[in-house]
Each structure stands twice: as structure tokens, then as C-alpha cells.
Amino acid sequence: MSSKQEQRSEETKKNILHAASRLFSKKGYDHVTMREIAKEAGCSHTTIYIYFKDKEALLHKLSMPVLQMLKEKLENISKDVTITSEEKLMEISREFIYFCLLNRSMYSIFITTRSSRVDVEEPDSEINRIRLELFNIIRLGIQECLSIDDNEQVLAFSRIFFFTIQGIIATYAYPHEPLEVLMARLTPTFHQAVEILLLGFKEKLKQRGCNK
């Protein structure tokens, strides 16, 4: 393939990805067809299959790089020995919220589209594998804060924690202020939410101990 052909091929591929991103964001993953993506990208409905075999391949290509970067950031925070377990969890939560609000038009595509349960041992795709790894960073952070070995209880607490984070993200998904300003204004509230959840989890564990 000549350099000009390679360049045209790369441009077509980028156009398809940009078109998929726009349409997924606007209409939702399940309501977009490959034919619509091809039309948006300015190529034929047969050409698109040269580059991507189906929508899941597009989802994979769009999601994996950004999820991998998020995972690396959360792992770095979790390995920081200069801060407490609670501070790690707060910073992990803040970074996750920041990522989702930064990608507000696509975060549901990256995080929840075609997602699997968090308690499966073998995820059905690479995207769900990395999503599970992200969830497990949060789960291990909670486990470290509470110093418990009960995996079922840690899983339940982690789900509650994740639901809370998702609620925060949904509340501020369409703010009328710059993201950096929003994060500066609300970070103390995010931290307080983590503190309250941990206090609630600890009280629940105390009650369980009393009932044994």
C-alpha cells in the first residue's frame, strides 16, 4: 500500500471513529446502526466493514485507550504510601468522577454500555475486563479502609459506593460551569460523601458484630 493510500485509509478510519463517537453520544449505543455510522463518516456501508466488523469493535476501539489511562491513574493512587487508606479512596473517587465528567458525553458508553456483572470471574470482553479491574481498585480501597475479609460484604459495600459515585456523575453531567471550577467547588462535598459512606459501613459492621 502506498503512503497516500495508507493516509486515506487512516483518515477513513478516524472519520468512522469520530462518527461513531458522535452518534453514540447523541442517540445511545443501542440506537445506532453501522449504516448510520458509515453515512455520518462519509463512506459506504460496505467500506465501514473493512475497518470494523461490528459496533462492538468500534466500542472497543473508542473505549480501551481511555479506560486504560484511567486504570493507570487509579492504580498509581492506590500504590501511594504517603497518604492514608481513606485519602486514597477519596482521591480514587475524585479521579473517577473527574474522568466521567471530562468525558460527559461518552462516559456511559465507556463505563456501562454492554457491561457485565461485577462479580463474574471471567468477563466476556476486554472492555468488561478492564471495567472490572477499575471496580476492583475501588473495592480493594474500601476493603483496606474497613480492614475486613468478608468478600460478600465488601462487594455489597462496593456496589453501594459505586452507585453513589454514579449518582454524583449523573447530577453534574451537564453543568453550566467549567469542569475545573466545578471540581474545585464540589471536591469537599465529594470527600464528605466518602467519609459518610465509610462511617455508615463501619456502623453496619459494628451492628453485625453486636448481633453475632
Image (spheres, rainbow, N blue to C red):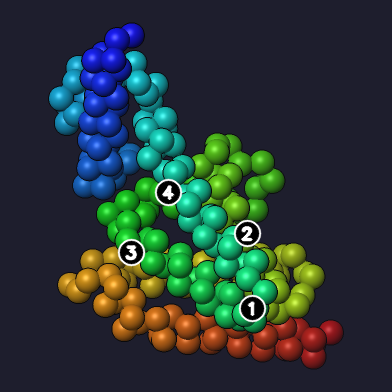
For the residues labelled 1 and 4, the Cα–Cα distance comes to: 27 Å
Q: How far apart in space, not on screen, are marks 4 and 3 (Cα)?
A: 13 Å
Q: Are marks 2 and 4 in contact (CB under 8 Å)?
A: no
Task: State which quarter of the image contains the C terminus.
Answer: bottom right
In front here: 115 or 192? 192
Residue that protrudes farthest toward the right in the picture: 212
Which image quarter: residue 9? top left
Please state which of the two labelled residues, at mark 1 or mark 4, is closer to the viewer: 1
The numbered mark, 4 or 3, whose residue comes first in the sequence reads: 4
Residue found at x 34% / y 16%: 50
Name the residue that disc number 3 marks.
101
Front-most of residues 45 and 152:
45
The vertical placement of 206 against 177, above or below, is below
Q: Nearer the viewer, mark 3 or mark 1?
A: 1
Task: Give the tally of numbered discs.
Answer: 4
Image depth: mark 1 or mark 2 in front: 1
At label 1, counting other C-alpha atoms closer than 10 Å, the crowd grade (few under 14, some 14-19, many 20 or more) is few
Hey, which residue is sitting farthest top in the picture? Answer: 1
Secondary structure under the numbered disc 2 in the rendered image: helix
Q: Determine which of the numbered discs, if any, sits on residue 136 in the image.
A: 2
Residue type of the residue flagged with mark 3: Leu
Q: CA distance from mark 1 to mark 2?
A: 21 Å
Disc 3 and disc 1: Cα gap in Å?
27 Å
Q: Earlier in the sequence, mark 2 or mark 4?
A: 4
Residue located 23% across and 66% down the image:
174
Instruction: Give the mark, 2 or 3, whose residue is nearer the N terminus.
Output: 3
Classify residue 169 as left or right of residue 177. right
The amino acid type found where label 2 is placed reads: Asn
Contact, mark 2 vs mark 3 (Cβ under 8 Å): no
**Which residue lies under the disc numbered 1?**
82
